[in-house]
Amino acid sequence: MKKAIILFLLIFLVAHFALPQGHRGKGRVRGFVFDEDGNPLEGVRVKLFSLRGKEGFETLTDAEGKWVAAWIRGGKWNIDFLKVGYEPKKISANISEVKRNPDIEMRLKKIEGLVITEELKGELEKGNKLFEEGSYQEAIEVYQKILEKFPDAYAISKNIGNCYFQMEKYERAQHYYQKVLEKEPDSNEMKLVIGNCYANLGEDEKALEWYNKIKFEEIDDPAVLYNLGTHFYDLSKFAEALRYYKRAVEIQNDFLDGIYQLGLTHLTLGQYKEAIGVFENYLNHDPDSGRASQVQGFIDFLKKQIEKKTE
């Protein structure tokens, strides 16, 4: 009887500890992951789930794009292929434990921007919430953990840069913005924020150097044009500022801040008639605000100045 009890306990313990190993068996399968041009992709997360075992595991591809799953049970498996910057893929495969399984080859399509998986989304939202609350150091720690787990998610470096920028640690901010620019050398946004870092460090010439890297004709965002114009204005580069404000208002004709600054720039350059025209246009869009009273004051002043010149 005692032997029977011990045997029962052994069977119970084996069964109990075998539950978390429901995917284990004698099967083996390997695969290769490539990009659209046939180049091997390293660091692809291959997630395998056994429908019979109701559990799974994951592995990563090596420098040759190869992955291996050994000692797995037979039956149907769901396999996911995930890599930041590439379109995720999901397949099903029947795995045999008694014969050689054919290699599984997969090609992933490169896509623009960052692919937000559920796992990544949760961490990113956590970091963004901390940023919005002003807990910048805590947000940086969350973002850095994301990069450790998803090293291809280089765009997260911009978030880290934004944290340092808010903390007025502009050299650190610039360092992380540069990381994004290395991957996206044509990014006007990164050139702008790097220029902003230099401007806030008081290095005006370096700031101008970076602003001038942005091709004027490629900018179609009025907010970016306005920000660039304001930086040139603050540096007393009024002719350059005028160019950017004009373009911003051309793109968005009811952009009140842009119209106002355009009028001020004409005024500063002594272009009184042009300033009056712009300020009158401002009042067409915003006739009743506190700023409108100020604008009307500018118009009255400028008209008097013009009258004096003609007397």
Image (cartoon, rainbow, N blue to C red):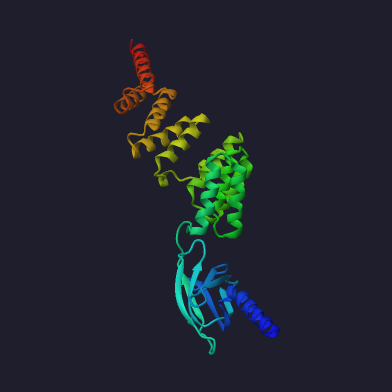
Left or right: 272 with respect to 129? left
- Residue in the picture at 47% in, 30% down: 238
Whether residue 203 appears in this view of the structure is no
Q: Is residue 112 shown above or below 160? A: below
Q: Residue furthest front?
A: 1
**Residue 186 screen position, x and y as percent:** 49, 52
Question: Between 208 and 296, which is closer to the camera in this rendering?
Answer: 296
287 to the left or right of 13: left
At a point 35% along the width and 40% down the height, the residue shown is 251
Direction right: furthest residue: 2
**Among the 4 quarters of the image, the one containing residue 207:** top right
> In x, y percent, where is residue 292?
36, 22
Farthest residue, direction bottom: 99
Q: Residue furthest left?
A: 284
Residue visible at 58% across and 74% down in the picture: 19
Whether residue 52 is situated above or below residue 240 in the rendered picture: below
- Quadrant location of residue 7? bottom right
Residue 118 seen in the current view: yes
Q: In this figure, what is the number of numbered marks?
A: 0
Give percent across and percent down for residue 184: 51, 54
The C terminus sits in image quarter? top left
Location of the N terminus by quadrant is bottom right
Q: Is residue 161 left or right of residue 272?
A: right
Question: Which residue is at a point 50% across and 69% down the rendered structure image?
Answer: 81
In front of the other: 25 or 59: 25
Q: Is residue 246 above or below residue 16?
A: above
Vertical side of 168 occupied by 37: above or below? below
Question: Seen in the image, is 147 located left or right of residue 265?
Answer: right
Place of residue 167 in the rendered image (x, y in percent of width and height, measured from the top left): 61, 38
